[in-house]
Image (spheres, rainbow, N blue to C red):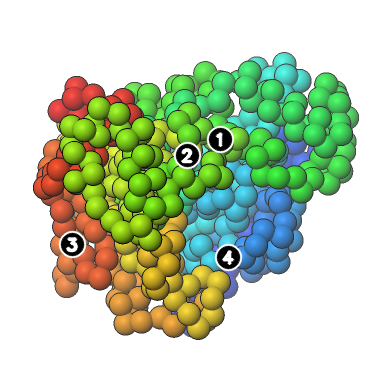
Amino acid sequence: MSIGIVKTTYGLAEGISHDNGLTEFRGIPYAAPPIRNLRWKPPVKPEGWEGVRTFDTYAPIEVQYQDRQGDDAVNHFPMSEDCLYLNVTTPAKAAGENLPVLVWFHGGGLTNGTPYGDEVEPYSFAKRGNVVITVGHRINIWGFMALPQLTKEQGTSGNYGLMDLAAALEWIWDNIEAFGGDRNNITAGGESGGTQKTCIMATIPAGGHRIRRVYNSSGLKWKQLPFKTLEEGEKAGQEYLKYIGLDPNTPLEQLRALDTYEIHHNVPREYYPGDIIYDGTFITEKSFGYLFDKYLENVDFINVTAEGESNVFAHRGASGVRGYFSGDVPVTDKASLYAFFKERLGDLYEKYDFEKLVSCADEDALFTAKKLGSIGISELASNNHSRNIMVNRLFGAYMKKHHPECKVYSLLWCHIPAAKDKPGATDRDDKPEHRLADHCTDCQYIFDTLDKKDAPWTELDRRYAELMGAYVSNFAKCGDVNGEGLPRIEETGSDLAYAKMADTVEMHTGLKSPLEELACEYVKKEYGITEEEIG
């Protein structure tokens, strides 16, 4: 039995009834197409419709760089500026069942990504009793380009993709009860760039404080460097236009009259506008830290860091889409490892007798450096504010002091899945780069998309698909990940507790070794975390 015809605020909607009891609605408009005169403007409400409209077809994905290696969704879905649609999968049989709602914001920074593909497939998670929503929105030049012309017209510019998400949340708030969801129990989830979206929407006034819980895969943004200023954003927009051969002072009516692909070119990613802009109006504070301090209300968190994803060699100060990622790998043996961390740690190197504390063979030097980065010894550079378990642990202490009613869980994802690009092989081998879990690999377990890839999955892989799906589903229901038959995960508070997800689920509390003490002291200093903040 499916939910049948749903009454939305814009008209009657019919979805696809699946044999597993789920009903899926594909391509529901939550805003008008942002094309022609609406290009680079805040979203406006969509038009309604007469009669029953069937939503059985996915909308086009956001216009972006094509032929990204391994990204099947980008290469196989049609693209359009007309992309402000969402997809709802519900296990409900009738309106008003008050099921928990998971809204998933896709990754890809703020320049790439899609609401489809391997990152998230809603069916397994929806069968656990959750309404699952994925959201398309403007990205790169369409969603984040600022220009002086736009600022003159609107008083500000940029952030259009985030305005889209705020509009999507408003649509969800107004309509989700008709799909069986509870609008007072919304979890926002995302991986990588999607976590910028979860953290922004959970804090800024424009998000309406509609998000009750957050799942961050590789991306707690608490201590990210300040947002770009409006002036910096305008300069980036002008540079993009110059790069593709357009006069950066072209009047808006001419820019809006151009064809999509007269403006969008397949350029290197760093040339796309793709940064949050502090404009004092839509983004009211200059960094995530200030937003958390001022606006965070009653939000539970799961923050996940993969053990091998720290940009340990990134240079201090690099941030945003134009952040500098060093191509150098200065650690090749034990001696270079010590030289690298001696420069990084300064006085802490001798204080903690680093060479006695950290020992490794020459061939393990790179592997060791990456592990040290993941536990916290990585500069406030690139995305290390997101890929650092110690920052997450200290955030738990911050929340315990300022919002003791909220639950925070910190996970260090160490399970290595089957090789992404090696059919018949696994990443569980002796190469240093294959011995640590990669960026956002937890997501395929939450949504149990393992069988979408022909790989030698093991019993442990299947076990983690069950565990992660259950943990996150429990969290979405009530804020507590724990449940019958599951290894217990403790909240992160003043004890800095975290769960290591390896061959088993291992709980760690406190600073139990000099290496952890070193990482904690380094992170506090490097990321500017004060005792006043964390208690």
Under tag 1, what secondary structure?
loop
SS state under label 3: strand
2 or 1: tag closer to the N-terminus = 2
**Label whose residue precedes the other's in the sequence (2 or 3):** 2
What residue is disc 4 on? 117
Q: CA distance from mark 3 to mark 4?
A: 31 Å
Q: Residue at x 58, y 62 (%)?
A: 116
Image depth: mark 1 or mark 4 in front: 1
Q: Which residue is mark 2?
A: 314
Of badges 3 and 1, the one in the foreground is 1
The quarter of the picture where residue 44 lies is top right
Q: Amino acid at mark 2?
A: Ala
Q: Residue at x 37, y 65 (%)?
A: 435
Q: Which labelled disc corresponds to residue 207?
A: none
The first of marks 1 and 4 along the sequence is 4
For residue 506, the mark is: 3
Kindly state the secondary structure of the residue where label 2 is placed.
Answer: loop
Q: How far apart are labels 4 and 2 at the CA level?
A: 29 Å
Q: Measured along the vertical axis of the image, is residue 325 above or below residue 105?
A: above
Residue 106 is left or right of residue 513, and the answer is: right
| Amino acid type at image mark 4 | Gly
C-alpha separation, residue under disc 2 versus residue under disc 3: 30 Å
Q: Amino acid at mark 3?
A: Glu
Q: Position of residue 256 (x, y in %)?
A: 83, 34
Q: Is residue 502 visible?
A: yes
Q: Residue at x 60, y 56 (%)?
A: 114
The circle drawn on residue 323 is 1
Q: Amino acid at mark 1?
A: Gly
Which of labels 4 and 2 is toward the front?
Answer: 2
Whether residue 43 is visible here, answered yes or no, is: no
Disc 2 + disc 1, Cβ < 8 Å: yes
